[in-house]
Amino acid sequence: MTDLRALLTKGLRPGVYRWQSAHTTDHVRREVAAAGWDFVLLDTSDIHDKAGFLDLCATAFDFPRWFGRNWDALADSLSDRSTGEPEIVLWTGLDHLLEHDHDTVDVALQILTEDTTNSGQLRVIVKDPPKADLLSALPAL
């Protein structure tokens, strides 16, 4: 059993977390599924700006075609999709987006944090986060 499965089995609380790990995305996906949780991947390794991030979210979260691709629409769509089932969001490649568009990362983290507080469904894991003041307040797994 990996440390991630142990955390999921014990009931990881909603929130946004930093996580240093050598595990591949596929390994994390299997661990999450084995623990009975839903899995969403946000890989921003090739994303450079807000528009790209919102397009990625539309696909990753399977938002409806009418998703507005703005911050308010993201917040609304995240809260609308609350199904009562806990969900793990693995965010990889954050350092790349941070280098290109710091503001997008800042707002996205605010929205994800707000949703974890309000809906209680999301557990966002920022894998191998860069060393940035923006992320220092996030708890580590």
Image (cartoon, rainbow, N blue to C red):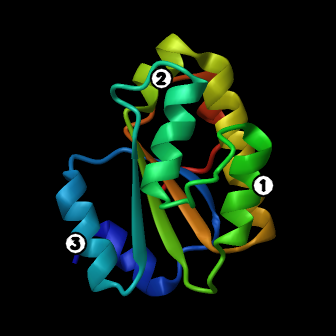
Residue 97's tag is 2
Q: Crowding near pointer 3: few (<14 within 10 Å), some, many (20+)?
A: some
Residue lying at the far front in this picture: please name it. Answer: 66
The amino acid beneath tag 1 is: Glu
Q: How many marks?
A: 3
Query: Residue 94 lies in what quarter of the image?
Result: top left
Q: CA distance from mark 1 to mark 2?
A: 20 Å
Q: CA distance from mark 2 to mark 3?
A: 26 Å
Q: Residue at x 69, y 59 (%)?
A: 77
Q: Crowding near pointer 2: few (<14 within 10 Å), some, many (20+)?
A: many
Q: Residue at x 61, y 33 (%)?
A: 135
Q: Residue at x 71, y 37 (%)?
A: 70
Residue corresponding to mark 3: 30
The amino acid beneath tag 2 is: Leu
Q: Earlier in the sequence, mark 1 or mark 3?
A: 3
Q: Are marks 2 and 3 in contact (CB under 8 Å)?
A: no
Place of residue 5 in the rendered image (x, y in percent of width and height, measured from the top left): 33, 76
Residue closer to the observer: 71 or 26: 71
Residue corresponding to mark 1: 114
Place of residue 73 in the rendered image (x, y in percent of width and height, measured from the top left): 74, 48
